[in-house]
Amino acid sequence: MDEESPSSRKSNEIEHKVYARVGLLGNPSDVYYGRTISFSLANFWATAKLQPSHHLIITPHPTHDLVQFSGLDHLVNRLQSEGYYGGVRLLMSICKVFYNYCNENNIELSKENFTLSYDTNIPRQTGLSGSSAIVCAALNCLLDFYKVRHLVKVEIRPDLILSAEKELGIIAGLQDRVAQVFGGLVYMDFNKDHMEKFGHGVYTPMDTSLLPPLQLIYAENPSDSGKVHSTVRKRWLDGDEFIVSSMAEVADLALQGQTAMLEKDYSKLADLMNRNFDLRRSMFGDDALGSLNIEMVEVARRVGAASKFTGSGGAVVVFCPDGPPQVKLLEDACKEAGFVIQPVKVVPSYLNEDDLKTLPG
């Protein structure tokens, strides 16, 4: 049998882009049957590419999955800055989770093979959901390659992405994956009864025009975003009254935030963002949050802006209620502190017709 020509393979290539996400309000209550509001951040993204091939091949990334070094010092420096993990494990894990889900739900997959690769420009360890963006992009490729997008409900896809990450020991909640599956601005309710009955929350897309202008601050050498949930989770499970009540208040901020945005009450939104961070700080403590992360929030607050983590640390979302002059003050303060600042760009929802058909109503 003749091999496909490179141009033929290219025409069969499937490519998906998935953006970073910002937790605007309510995080981290998604892990505690709470509520959150998140949106897709157009500033950064991950892509996955899939094309038919004779063997099933997971392609290592030339930078993020480096296996060739100039010497031991290069290898050690690389491991100290980037860790041991690239994206290959993420692609393998979502392939496994996707295959098992289809088997368990009698979704027949063709016997074709593929080559799967990825790329990303999402800064590492910034709490912008870089890992789940890669996984979500790869899942989208698999859904299209096997032509099963209409059989795997939109509301279930965040669970599949999270399952793939949990396989690898990544600590996370559903909100990031929901924002990345839906795109745009999404209000999420992780009510315990609904979660236990249906296996997912209630997800309500909102108009992205309801968002005021926002800024993103991040550090180029941030802390690890996967270590901050540990003691709080145990205390919550043990029924610690302070943690349980504080987490319930965090969840309520998202509900109030939805109303504030619908009414375009942005001074209220600013108060809610600040309260969100203050509650997180009181629960987790400064040692868990890290001095660099706290300083990013404080830099914004010193110029009178509202600020909170986008995720679990590494980046901060900021609202300057006084407009451009306040943004300029913030830019100067960030430059002096050595932080990167960018205006937030929001991605509208990118669900297609097949996706929308799987949603209730």
Image (tube, helix red, strand yellow):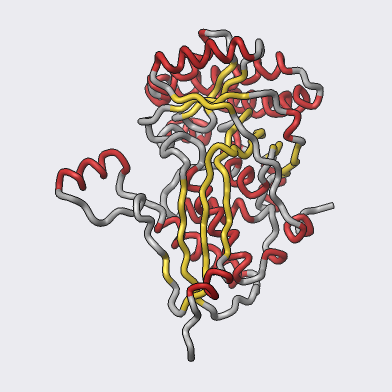
In this view, 54 is above or below 311: below
Is 274 located above or below residue 139 in the figure? above
Q: Which residue is drawn at 40% across and 63% down?
A: 59
Q: Where is residue 48 in the image (x, y as percent from the top left)?
A: 51, 57
Q: Is residue 290 above or below residue 227?
A: above
Q: In which quarter of the image is residue 241?
A: top right
Residue at 59% of width from left, 72% of height from top? 103
Furthest residue in direction bottom, as rendered: 1
Q: Is residue 188 visible?
A: no
Please determine whether, in this image, residue 317 is positioned above or below residue 188. above
Image check: 256 left or right of 46?
right
User: Which is nearer the eye, 100 or 46?
Assistant: 46
x and y percentages locating residue 147 in the rendered image? 66, 70
- Count up the numbered dots: 0
Residue 247 point in image, percent of width and height: 59, 27
Residue appearing at x 63%, y 14% in the figure: 324
Residue at horizontal 44%, vertical 62%?
Answer: 92
Q: Which quadrant of the structure image shows residue 349?
A: top right
Work out whether residue 147 or residue 334 is closer to the camera in this orientation and state it: 334
Which residue is nearer to you in this view: 193 or 260?
A: 260
**Residue closest to the far left:** 72
Q: Position of residue 84 (x, y in %)?
A: 30, 49
